[in-house]
Image (tube, rainbow, N blue to C red):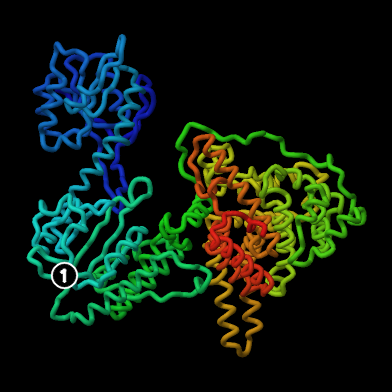
Amino acid sequence: MEERHLDNDFEEDGLRNGPRRKAAFTEVQFGPMRLYEDQLQVLLVFAKEDSQSNGFSWACEKANFRCTVARTPESALECYLDKHHDIVVIDHRHSRYFDAEALCRSIRAVSFSENTVIVAVVKRPEREEASVMPLIAAGFSRRYVENANVMTCYNELIQLEHGEVRAQFKLRACNAIFAALEQSQEAIEITSEDQVIQYVNPAYESIMGYQKGELMGKEVMEVPKSEKNKPDLLESINSCIRKGKEWQGIYYGKKKNGDSVQQSVKITPVIGQGGKIRHYVSINRPLNDNNKTDKSSDRVQAESQTDNQSCKHKDRRKGSLDVRSTTSRGSDGSSQRRHSSMARIHSMTIEAPITKVINIINAAQESSPMPVAEALDRVLEILRTTELYSPQLGTKEEDPHTNDLVGGLMTDGLRRLSGNEYMFAAKHPHHLPGHLSTPLSLNDIPPQIAQTMENEESWDFDIFNLEAATMKRPLTYLGLKVFSRFGVCEFLNCTEATLRSWLQVIEANYHSSNSYHNSCHAADVLHATAYFLCKERVKQSLDPIDEVAALIAATVHDVDHPGRTNSFLCNAGSELAILYNDTAVLESHHAALAFQITIRDDKCNIFKNMERNEYRTMRQAIIDMVLATEMTKHFEHVNKFVNSINKPLAALEENGGNGEEESVKSILTSPENRILVKRMLIKCADISNPCRPLELCIEWAGRISEEYFAQTDEEKRQGLPVVMPVFDRNTCSIPKSQISFIDYFITDMFDAWDAFADLPNLMQHLDNNFKYWKGLDERKLHTLRPPPE
């Protein structure tokens, strides 16, 4: 038996193909635990030294694993009992030297071997591939077909380290977790997703009077329940936890002897594979009955049930922007946690703003009464989540339309489930200007088109009439008129001919084949942007450079859109998704391409005469607004606007007094708030269809539905995950999809924008359109319009 011990430094070794890895503790994150993995130990069991054993020895040296070589089964077992190796590699090629399977079984007979990875080195098969079942039956974890190449051996060891060995390392850590559960004074119960009991700790046995064997494998509903609980309490609890939300409150458990015990209970759903709930963990603490009357417990139960109403999917049309108070959730040890839960944060030398907020709350807890401290504990829990701005939805069954819309618009897709890759159907070159017949100036616009645009300053302007009159080129014509009205050429110091060429090339790069994301949508967003820019509050807030940037951003915000969502492109492994790392794929592409096609030709470069710093400011503003149209940060943008602008303005209006005008100006014109106003403006313009007159709203609903139907069709053809299953052209209810979109995305955002910009006509349209879709849905109609009488 020989042992190879390695230094901790890099060394070049030409024979063994490159530098060794530096030995160090490896940090492994396992849920909330941080684990430290020591240098791996490898045992090689080869009767004789040959190229294969040397290959693994040198690979261990390169990987900086501690390596021991044993020549006999006896010395191998003795060495394993002494060192507890992480990986054992046994030569299974030559049965005349020793029985590899017998050695493996001997190692597996050792109690701690369950966390060891054992590899069998087998001969390269001459004819048919042999079954691995005998190896698995003997206790081997893996088979390695002989290959003495050092790099192949090295790759095998590294894959084992990051695969099976790391998994076994985490499983070993579970023993520590279960040791803590076994010693806990609180009764702990773990159930499966189907609420089958999988574990109870000794404290549970002691308090409830059951033995583990009497409970394991039973459904929770089979265990006797106390009659002291409110009749619908169990239903309320299940309704809450099945949505992935924690439930906390007072509950009466029934002991084995029939007595009821009042408990403070916290039930936490545990998300596992596939993002689904895989377990429920229930922590129960008996309450002192001398200090709790039935009356007070009834009150707490009632509060718990009232609290649970917040778990239900609510109609977001009313009051969802209110600041809701946080109530106490019962005394379950929060006071103990508040002294230590954020202790580490105080030692940080670099503080992010959220860290400062948490520190302030933590400090306030120290001197607060118990109910306040517990409420602040709940606040801290919320602040620690990553999705601070995204409301939690009901279950898929409750509202499939909303869930699918959120899945399709607010995520970057499931990971690919097939080998199919989506490329743009036609890798068309981006169009150059100069091949379309477009008027030289506003004066040359044909009378019919000019007449169509006469009321373009009105919110009720019909963009579809312009689309028809211009033969699907509304963006160039509307752009010329709107940009002229806002003096864009004068601001940019460019000619009208340059602007015309620019509008022409941008419009040419929208896909007319898309039913929704085409140049008509861009023209519609440009029209809404121009309308909002004329509102008094908006004018007070923005500078001329902001207005010009907003008009340009609206014009280019969906250029070269393929008619598919970000989720689709990520799932399909498209070139764009790879280029932009599955993050804001389309929005990044729209912004980048807009500048590429603008600056590559002087004939359409509207920025060519701008001063450098002014151009940088303009460019940054345009990019920021285009990226703001991405829906994953929808609620973040809306909530920041409400908290930074709506609420301070409302407070000023309520208080009145001297200096109000100056204070309003300060809120409206601060650099940070101007950015929020521009983001909100383009977001509202981008999805303003439900606030248009009914006929326009219906047309847009039909167009977006058709585009989603086409995506679902293609996902099914290509074997990709179906991002929005409800958008199946054979079964989809368009009214339901519109109701969900308005409830989830539109109402709160336009309530906030209306409070700022004063848009009563839009809100009236929104109300009328919502009632229209509700009426169709109540009649169980799935179509855009009711059938003719």
Whole-percent x and y of residue 322?
49, 75
Which of the image's four quarters has the N terminus?
Answer: top left
Q: Amino acid at mark 1?
A: Pro
Q: Residue at x 63, y 76 (%)?
A: 666
Label 1's element?
strand
Quadrant hosting residue 187: bottom left
Q: Is residue 353 visible?
A: yes
* Image height of 122 relative to 688, above or below: above
Query: Mark 1 highlights which residue?
Result: 286
Lateral position of residue 716 relative to residue 469, left or right = left
Viewer-nearest residue: 732 or 248: 732
Foreground pick, 736 / 56 = 736
Quarter of the image with the C terminus in it? bottom right
Q: What residue do we see at 17% from left, 73% from top?
A: 287
Q: Is residue 364 above or below residue 567?
A: below
Q: Residues within 10 Å of mark 1 (few under 14, many from 20)?
A: some
434 horizontally vs 618: left or right: right
| Image spot of residue 335 (x, y percent) | 25, 73
Measuring from the top left, give residue 19's x and y in whole percent.
Answer: 37, 29
Give the image location of residue 670, x and y in percent: 62, 71
Q: Is residue 65 above or below residue 14?
A: below
Work out whether residue 743 or residue 578 is closer to the camera in this orientation and state it. Answer: 743
Q: Residue furthest front?
A: 789
Residue found at the very far top of the displayed protein: 126
Q: Is residue 151 left or right of residue 461?
A: left
Q: How many marks?
A: 1
Q: Is residue 614 visible?
A: no
Residue beneath the point at 89% across and 54% down: 445
Q: Quadrant of residue 638?
A: bottom right
